[in-house]
Image (cartoon, grey):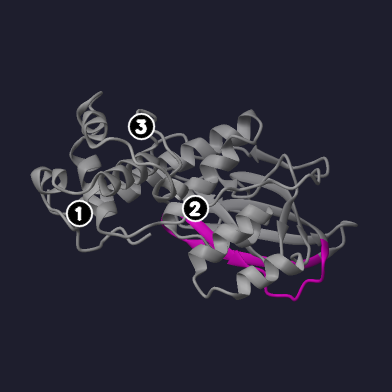
Amino acid sequence: MNLNPEPVCKTIMECLNLSATAIERGLCEAGKLLGRKHYTCNCRHSEDRTTHDKSFLLSQMFSNNFFSQISWAVFFSVLGSGSVALADYNPPDAEVPDGSTVANGSRTSCIMEEGNTAFTPLIPLTHLAKGDRQPELAFYVPTTSEYRVDIGLLDSDGEFLEFIEATGTEPGIVSVPVTMILETGRYQIHAGLACDDASQYHTEAIAYFELEALPEAVQTEVADTADAATQSEIYADAGYWLDAFTLADETQRLDLLQQLASLETTEQQANLVAIAEALTMKQTTDVTAHTVP
């Protein structure tokens, strides 16, 4: 989603003159970005069903302090951004092998960002993540220190295949492509976060994924569009997490993480919820910096 479009309205009064459909979409998408539950709807299909009465929508806008100044900025931005495809992730039935975990190490030099975020592989831990294409592995790194993420890739028998290293200095999502060509099958990821050239990891994680060819009908559907966001939606619907998350835009990624959180066990769920909150705050801050209040 482009969060810096030329908005179709720049004041509350201008926005109130829009159609009920436009107002509803603005409410819906702004609520998704902000994680609010005062107003809920299926944004993906909001234009395919009967739109709420405009007076009802306006009451939602002004009730329960739904909109702060930041929220209005998001609302204005959404109204000018066009429709956004939000994917419905359908997890596969395949169970993940025993051993998927995230474990904190001893106290290290990592300086963590504010909040409850933790170093987290952005991948399912309670079911097996699937991919169709050459995979790109995503992690959330919460440190403001100079950091290093070490990743060991192993096959299903535990045989070492590749070592990958990613470095950075700012918190956020880090995407790491696998460079060696992988065949279909199951793989293990062993990852560790270290800061300031430390030899000891602050946090370590183990996760699994499987590469499996798309069904022919889904392959055709993906090939029929060149739009990455639409492809992400197709992959998510088919249960291919790795491809869906790699191709997703910022808004879709946030939505996918929120959906995954609802499927995970307590610790991973808490990590994903905290990450979604941190990403939401960053998005709304970015919007405020580029939107006329």
Q: Is residue 163 magenta?
A: yes
Left or right: residue 161 compared with residue 223? right
Which residue sits furthest right?
Answer: 157
Camera-nearest label, 3 or 2: 3
Quadrant (top left/top right/bottom left/bottom right) for the N terminus: bottom left
Quadrant location of residue 35?
top left
Name the residue that disc number 3 marks: 39
3 or 2: tag closer to the N-terminus: 3
Picture layout, residue 95 above or below residue 233: above
Name the residue that disc number 1 marks: 289
3 or 1: tag closer to the N-terminus: 3
Residue at 25% from the left image edge and 63% from the top image edge = 5
Kind of residue sitting beneath label 1: Ala
**How many numbered discs, if any?**
3
Name the spot of residue 38 as percent of width and height, x first: 35, 28
Picture layout, residue 180 above or below residue 279: below
Distance, label 3 to label 2, CA atoms, is 21 Å
Q: Main secondary structure of the magenta part?
A: strand
Distance, label 2 to label 1, CA atoms, is 21 Å
Name the spot of residue 270 as percent of width and height, x first: 55, 32
Name the spot of residue 179 as percent of width and height, x first: 68, 74
How crowded pointer 2 is (Cα within 10 Å; few <14, some 14-19, many 20+) is rated as: many
Camera-nearest label, 3 or 1: 3
The magenta segment: 161-185
Residue at 62% from the left image edge and 62% from the top image edge = 243
How crowded pointer 3 is (Cα within 10 Å; few <14, some 14-19, many 20+) is rated as: some
